[in-house]
Amino acid sequence: MEEKNPITQGPLMKTFILYFVPIFLGSLIQQSFSLVDAFIIGRYAGISSLAAIDATYGYTKLLINVFITLSLGGTVLISQYYGANKLKEVDDAVHTLMLFAIIGGLVIAVVGYSCSPYFAALMKVPPDIYEMATAYLRIYLSGAMFVFIFNIGSAILKAVGDTRFPFHLLLMASVGNLLLDALFIMGFGWGIQGAAYATVCAQGFSSIMMLIRLSRSKGLIQLSLNRLRIKMDVLLPILKLGIPLGTQSALYSISNIYMQRAINSFGTASIAAWAINGKLDFIIWLIIDAIGITTTTFIAQNYGANQSNRMKASARFSMIMGITMVGLLSLFMYYGVKPLSSLFTSNDTVIELSVQMFRMISPFYAIAIVSEVFSGAIKGIGDTFKPMVLTLIGTCAFRIAWIIYMLPKSPTVMTVLLGYPVSWMISTLLFTSLYFFMRRRFSSFKVDAVMENRVEGIT
């Protein structure tokens, strides 16, 4: 008897939550790498070291996230193939995607190491933290291949419904990162470079274990290293979906780089305060990201299974769940931001700046979940071009225009940060309009024909 796929046939709310929770917890543990770094660095290496990491954070996000999102076009296809029970296509996509990740990781490591000093200068990193920022970047980006292997492997597992193993692996890697942080920073006194080495070692461990897990899999996603090869009839559909995703991620990162560059111009205290905010609100963004990933997977698999009503129900439930969780957490953190900020530093100036920043932005986080859900739903049906265009307009173009035209009128760091919630509102209006326009077409999609054409490289 054929086993039922709970995403396309099981109880929706229960399955959605069971799928979401491991993704969120796994991402929470993964992000604890930077959280642990920030706590130990802020307390034991000083506020300048904490600022040095965040001053160029947008650069690492640009190099790493762009390639990961480019590759995630393949996981959308894997979800669709899996939902449609296309076994050979699943196997081909897994092997093509993993080799693509390995090659990309090596390329990014070389480019990142070589260009780090130039980018630190472009980001207007203050002279007192320039050398520390460059050293951290070079070490961290040297391990880019580890990041790619783990994230792509994790995405492959999640695409077919396995969220437990990535979660358990991240838990082990996080504990290892914590121990190495303590050893390298508190024990050896290596400062910011010790934090970078600890993170790379932990990521190396997680990538090796991921390859072992995939190679020992007995299901559709079994990875055989001697069968790793780039199949163009598989890569082209992946790139067709992935290039808009990668471009969207690049645009998003570029806009954040532009914003961070403006923040950097206000000095080390402002950079450190914004860095602390990034460590405090990362849980909110993990919820938003996990909701988006879950929405895309549910829409993609039900799209492959021709379940149009279930697609709409998935989007509706993810919206309710996301707004509720983000709204309640934002409210809690609004009142608790001061004691939370003091965990990272005892510098009163930095703490007060952090409180002001967070309380200005936190009421708007719930708006961001709306555009994430609608964007995830549209990506799930294989349309990644339109979300890219809307991201270009609502995020990248607007934030750059904000810095160029609004910041000179009121040259303060708070003016810079106000650009974030305003851009969220614009993006939400755009994605909401697009989703309700496209939702009317859900029941008319000819899924099998579309997927067959995509495999053949026709569409």
Image: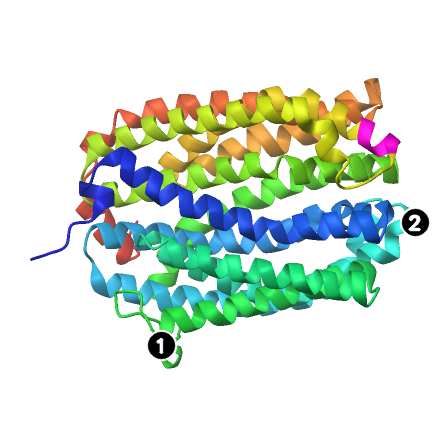
Distance between the Cα atoms at labels 2 and 1? 48 Å
Task: Estimate the x, y position of residue 373 in percent, counting from the top left.
Answer: 42, 31
Q: In the rendering, at what x and y percent does residue 436 appear?
A: 34, 22
Tag 2: amino acid: Pro
Magenta span: chief secondary structure: helix
Write the residue at 51% across / 48% down.
27
- Location of mark 2 (residue): 127
Residue neighbourhood size for the residue with mark 1, other residues' Cα within 10 Å, grouped as few (<14), some (14–19), many (≥20): some
In the image, 423: left or right of 300? right
Q: Which residues are magenta?
A: 348-352
Question: Residue 413's image quarter?
Answer: top right
Image check: 145 left or right of 308?
A: right
Rendered position, 22 above or below 96:
above
Compared across the picture, whether 65 is left or right of 228 comes to right
Residue 303 in view in this figure: yes
> Which of the two residues, 262 or 157, is positioned nearer the viewer here?
157
According to the image, label 1 marks what residue?
224
Q: Position of residue 343 (x, y in %)?
A: 75, 39
